[in-house]
Image: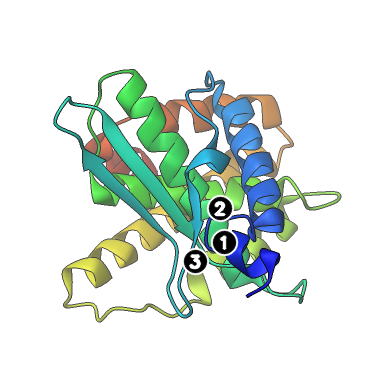
């Protein structure tokens, strides 16, 4: 076994993924004006072959929250949107849980998934040159409409992912109509920060309004 193979088991092989996760964390904290609680890179591990991203949490006997974020490895192709979205989702989960723990607020699985769905658009939209309403609509279609779900709709997880997907789609469409089309980006960031701070039911109501 080579030195590289030995180190890979300790997460040292996640060089690109760790760097990308760090950039995503900085971007989300900047958008939502959050203080750094912990570095996501300290909690990363590689996902097993075929495994999707997952944030594992456990409350220790002393009340401390133990966290591990397992991420898929990026492929050599720049078109690997699925792996990129999984990394964004994983970092979104980490940032959201860390902020909720810092402020002594709870969260739900649906709340986590809904925020992550919105955060995928937030992160990817920021990378698009000359971003406008039509480019946002194209991105939104790729993220929320041209998708396949891992679980059946009758399954609890399948229902949760579908609700998060559809709700994020409606919320982003409203952002396009009210802010992107008119290039009111400062006001849009205020709305995004408001959405981030809301709880599950308030998020659902806001996204479904208008």
Instruction: Tell me where residue 104 appears, x and y as whole percent.
Output: 25, 20
* Residue 85: mark: 1
Q: Is residue 97 left or right of residue 145?
A: left
Q: Nearer the viewer, mark 3 or mark 2?
A: 2
Is residue 159 at all visible to an observer of this figure? yes
* Above or below for 62 versus 19: above
10 Å neighbourhood of mark 1: few (<14), some, or many (≥20)?
A: many
| Mark 2 in CB contact with mark 1 (< 8 angstroms) | yes
On the image, the x and y values in percent for residue 112 come to 34, 46
Corner quadrant of residue 153:
bottom left
Which mark is on residue 144?
Answer: 3
Can residue 140 be seen at all in this image of the molecule? no
Question: Label 1 vs label 3: CA separation?
Answer: 12 Å
Tell which circle, 1 or 3, labels the residue nearer the N-terminal end: 1
Circle 2 Cα neighbour tier, 10 Å, few/some/many (<14 / 14–19 / ≥20): many
Please report the residue visible at 53 percent of the width from the left and 18 percent of the height from the top. 35
Q: Quadrant of the N terminus?
A: bottom right
Residue 37 at x, y percent in the picture: 47, 23
Quarter holding the C terminus?
top left
Are the residues flagged by discs 1 and 3 in contact, CB closer than 8 Å? no
Q: Locate residue 49, reporting x and y percent.
A: 48, 79
Q: Residue at x 44, y 80 (%)?
A: 148
Task: Please report whichever mark, 3 or 2, sits nearer to the chain's N-terminal start.
Answer: 2
Residue where numbered disc 2 is placed: 88
Give me the C-alpha separation between circle 3 and circle 2: 15 Å
């Amino acid at each position: 076994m080579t030195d590289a193979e030995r180190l890979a088991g300790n997460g040292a092989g996640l060089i690109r993924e760790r760097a990308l996760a760090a950039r995503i964390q900085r971007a989300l904290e900047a958008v939502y004006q959050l203080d750094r609680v912990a570095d996501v890179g300290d909690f990363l591990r590689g996902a097993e072959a075929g495994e999707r991203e997952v944030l594992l949490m456990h409350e220790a006997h002393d009340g401390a929250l133990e966290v591990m974020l397992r991420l898929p490895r990026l492929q050599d192709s720049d078109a690997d949107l699925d792996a990129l979205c999984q990394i964004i989702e994983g970092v979104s989960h980490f940032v959201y849980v860390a902020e909720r723990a810092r402020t002594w607020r709870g969260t739900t699985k649906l709340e986590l998934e809904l925020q992550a769905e919105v955060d995928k658009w937030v992160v990817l939209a920021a990378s698009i040159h000359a971003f406008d309403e039509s480019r946002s609509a194209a991105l939104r279609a790729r993220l929320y409409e041209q998708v396949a779900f891992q679980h059946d709709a009758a399954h609890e997880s399948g229902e949760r992912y579908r609700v998060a997907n559809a709700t994020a789609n409606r919320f982003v469409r409203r952002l396009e109509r009210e802010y992107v089309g008119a290039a009111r980006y400062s006001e849009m960031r205020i709305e995004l920060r408001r959405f981030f701070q809301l709880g599950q039911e308030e998020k659902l109501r806001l996204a479904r309004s208008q």
